[in-house]
Amino acid sequence: VNFSLGAPLPPPPPTPSMSGPVTIRTRKFLRNPLLNRQQMVVDVHHLGKANVSKQELSQKIAEMYKVSDPQLVVCFGFRTQFGGGRSTGFALIYDKLENLKQYEPKYRQVRQGVLERKDSSRKQIKETKNRNKKVRGTGKRLQKHKTKRANR
């Protein structure tokens, strides 16, 4: 193509829309009666999108499996495949909120909005840890009580 000084530039090639269709497939579905949950691997096809938010995924999975509260669906561990367009991760659907609180790690409960993150500085945590290292035996319980009162 010959571009002279006065000629307009050609239009850019069309890009896929940023709100392309999102397809969710689940596989390796397992009912875990000991932990009162259903667990599965989730494959997400999201052409034209960088990725899909975990909140959006948990709502769609809740609709798929007819779960009353989308807060009971915990999505984690998503990795986008090289080249984009596909992600794979895990999802857990708990029977009750009490089960989720009992078995899920605290950091994931904070992500879900079930727990509130407690704010304490890194230095404060280390000072408490080192103070507790100096106390042995029955004094340990009293020391923990004192540090909790001091951090209020």
Image: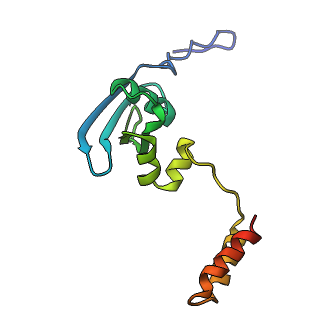
* Residue 70 % position (x, y): 46, 31
Would you say 151 lies left or right of 60 here? right
Q: Is residue 16 above or below residue 83?
A: above
Estimate the x, y position of residue 127 in percent, counting from the top left: 70, 77
Residue drawn at x 68%, y 83% as measured from the top left: 131
107 and 82: which one is in front?
Answer: 107
On the question of residue 145 being in view, the answer is yes
Residue at 63 percent across and 88 percent down: it is 135
Residue 139 placement, left or right of 36: right
Which quadrant of the view contains residue 59?
Answer: top left
Which is nearer the eye, 10 or 72? Answer: 72
Nearer the observer, 110 or 88? 110
| Quarter location, residue 152 | bottom right
Residue at (51% x, 33% y) in the render: 55
How is the structure coloured here? Answer: rainbow
Q: Position of residue 25 (x, y in %)?
A: 30, 30
Report the label total.
0
Q: Is residue 1 above or below residue 138?
A: above
Q: Can you see residue 46?
A: no
In the rendered image, the residue lying farthest to the top is 7
Residue 81 in which image quadrant: top left
- The residue sitting at 48% across, 36% down in the picture is 71
